[in-house]
Amino acid sequence: MAAMEGSGQAPLPETEFSSGDGDKQMILEGRLFKANLLLAQSMVELAPQDRHFSHELEQNLIALCRSLDIPVPLWLSKNTTEFARFHQTVFFSEQFTDKVNFDRFQIKWEDDGR
């Protein structure tokens, strides 16, 4: 992610992403909240371009942010830990370089069942 280069932020998880059949897709769901009110949600599912999970996650995160019309958040080490452990993470408004009209942005990796 361009926002991460040289900023001292944690890298995205770097693992192999392969289902053995070569066509596994990553499904990423995003939800925007203000307080406890759900403002918007979206889901993206892109065909894999390469075998590195971190690259697939980055591309899906960018697509998800575009679909919700929000800037891409800064990915911190806490996001790496949460995503690796729970397959989801939360970005707070302070993690966006532009002013946003929501308190938090939650992403969740959905298993496509293949």
Image (spheres, rainbow, N blue to C red):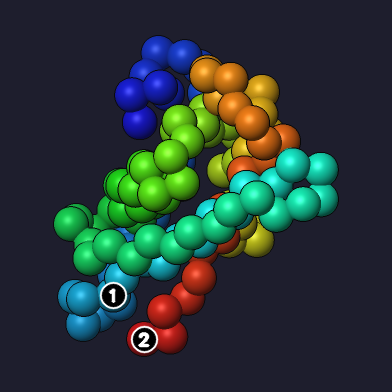
Q: Identify the residue shown where x is 65% and y is 50%.
A: 39
Tell me where residue 31 sits by quadrant. bottom right
Q: Is 54 rendered above or below residue 49? A: above
Which residue lies most toward the bottom here?
114
Give the left or right position of residue 104, taking residue 42 as reference. right
Identity, as a three-letter code, of the amino acid under mark 1: Lys
Residue at 55 percent of width and 57 percent of height: 41
Mark 2 sits on what residue? Answer: 114
The answer to whether residue 106 shows anywhere in this view is no
The CA span between labels 1 and 2 is: 7 Å
Q: Are marks 1 and 2 in contact (CB under 8 Å)?
A: yes
Query: Residue under circle 1?
Result: 24
Q: Amino acid at mark 2?
A: Arg
Which quarter of the figure is the N terminus placed in? top left
State the SS at label 1: loop
- Coordinates of residue 91 in the picture (x, y in percent): 63, 38
